Amino acid sequence: MKTIFVDGYNVVNSWPNLKQRKDFSFEAARQTLIDKLHNYGVFKACKIVLVFDAHKVMGNLEKKEEVNRNILVIFTKDGETADNYIEKQVNSLGRKHEIVVVTSDSLEQQTVFQRGAVRMSSLEFYNEVIKVEKSIKIKGDKNKSIDRNSISDNIDEKTAIILEEIRRSK
């Protein structure tokens, strides 16, 4: 299974819709990102590790929150940046797994590339997520338009009226 490491605040500051949202609430921007990545992870059948910096939060301990089997949210510990965390993880996983790192930090991109990961800029990933959202919508619309075998297709009008009256009387 492919693993995608996402530098959370780098993405929040790069994606147009999240950039606007963070001006009002960082929490709302983070939650929107988590929701979008959840849909992406399920559709693409990959694991996403979303890493947020907490290195300037005094005394903060590393916090991991497994949203579901496709997405894990990490808040780094005091003194550790998202870049540091991602580099350590990529280094430990090495070239044994298919790993993608999403960040627009060019130094970080070079570092993870040297350690065997594929790099993707935040805006490239944004376009990829938008494309997947469109695919999900098309697939959902297609499922809605499939003719279903409903009860009204199989009963006469008189019975349908009686059933409707029963339904409304409750």
Image: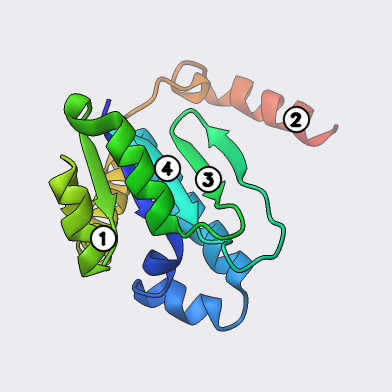
Label 2 or label 1, whichever lies nearer to me, is 1
Relative to 69, does residue 91 appear above or below in the rendering? below
Inspect the image, locate mark 4, and give the three-letter code of the amino acid beneath it: Val
Q: As drawn, which residue projects farthest toward the top?
A: 154
Tell me the quarter of the image containing the C terminus. top right
* Crowd tier of the residue under label 1, counting other residues whose Cα lies within 10 Å: few below 14, some 14–19, many 20 or above: some
Inspect the image, locate mark 2, and give the three-letter code of the amino acid beneath it: Arg
- Badge 3 marks a residue whose secondary structure is strand
User: Which badge, 2 or 3, comes first in the chain's sequence?
Assistant: 3
Spatial separation of the CA atoms under disc 4 and disc 3: 6 Å
Residue that numbered label 4 is attached to: 49
User: Which badge, 4 or 3, comes first in the chain's sequence?
Assistant: 4
Spatial separation of the CA atoms under disc 1 and disc 3: 19 Å
Residue that numbered label 3 is attached to: 73
Tell me the quarter of the image containing the N terminus. top left
Q: x, y percentage for residue 91? A: 29, 38
Label 2 or label 3, whichever lies nearer to me, is 3
- Badge 2 marks a residue whose secondary structure is helix
Inspect the image, locate mark 1, and give the three-letter code of the amino acid beneath it: Glu
- Badge 4 marks a residue whose secondary structure is strand
Determine whether, in the image, residue 34 is placed left or right of residue 101.
right
Residue that numbered label 2 is attached to: 167
* Crowd tier of the residue under label 3, counting other residues whose Cα lies within 10 Å: few below 14, some 14–19, many 20 or above: some
Spatial separation of the CA atoms under disc 4 and disc 1: 16 Å
Q: On residue 108, which mark appears?
A: 1
